Amino acid sequence: MTNQEQAAGFRLAAGTFATGVGIVSSVYDDIPLAMTVNSFTTVSLQPPMVLICLKHRSRLLAQIRNSGILAVTVLAADQRDIARWFADARRPSSAAAFAGVRVHRAPATGCLVFSEGLAYFDCQVRELSEQGDHAVVISETMSYGPLHPAKAPLLYLHGTYRWITPTPSAASAA
């Protein structure tokens, strides 16, 4: 089996695991940058920490290395177009990428938060390690909170965006 065949098989198997979808942003020299991710998880409650994984060649990883800060916005199902846009490597690498998108500054770092998301995590990088073709970034959450938690979450499964609709009892419990 070639490396390319092995990678394709691994991607197919990993695609059976449904993940949430988020956008990670960072700001350096007042220049914002963001990209869509599905490799996001919480690490610790005390202190509150999160983990993301980014390809070594991503523009965002270089920016995070320079700034030491990031924000994660968990996306809602109605944000599929925004997820696609920030997953496209051809998008502008400047403030022009955010035209027409409702964002606000995170309170601790000033990174951009996507205002129509489900929740946000405003973070300072604690550890960055190289693992395979990605970097694992562990960050301490300086501020966080819900944005629109009753909205349906955006999911990624089998290489496509999907969503679930919360049941009425689950939505009222949130």
Image: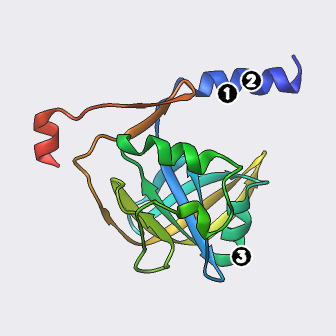
Give the residue pinned by disc 2.
Answer: 8
Query: How much space separates mark 3 and mark 2, taking CA atoms?
Result: 32 Å
Residue sitting at x 44%, y 80%: 108
Residue sitting at x 17%, y 32%: 167
Q: Taking 83 as reference, is 167 left or right?
A: left
Residue sitting at x 40%, y 39%: 154
Residue 149 vertical position relative to residue 138 in the rendered view, above or below:
above
Circle 3: element type: helix
Q: Residues within 10 Å of mark 3 (few under 14, many from 20)?
A: few
Residue 97's quadrant in the figure?
bottom right
Give the residue pinned by disc 1.
Answer: 11
Residues tagged 1 and 3 counted as in contact (Cβ below 8 A): no
Q: Taking 105 as reference, is 87 left or right?
A: right
Q: Which of 13 and 36 is in front in this view?
A: 36
Residues tagged 2 and 1 counted as in contact (Cβ below 8 A): yes
N-term-proximal mark, 1 vs 3: 1
N-term-proximal mark, 3 vs 2: 2
Residue type at mark 2 is Ala
Circle 2: element type: helix
Query: How much space separates mark 2 and mark 1, taking CA atoms?
Result: 5 Å
Residue 14's quadrant in the figure?
top right
Residue 35 vertical position relative to residue 2 in the rendered view, above or below:
below
Give the residue pinned by disc 3.
Answer: 66
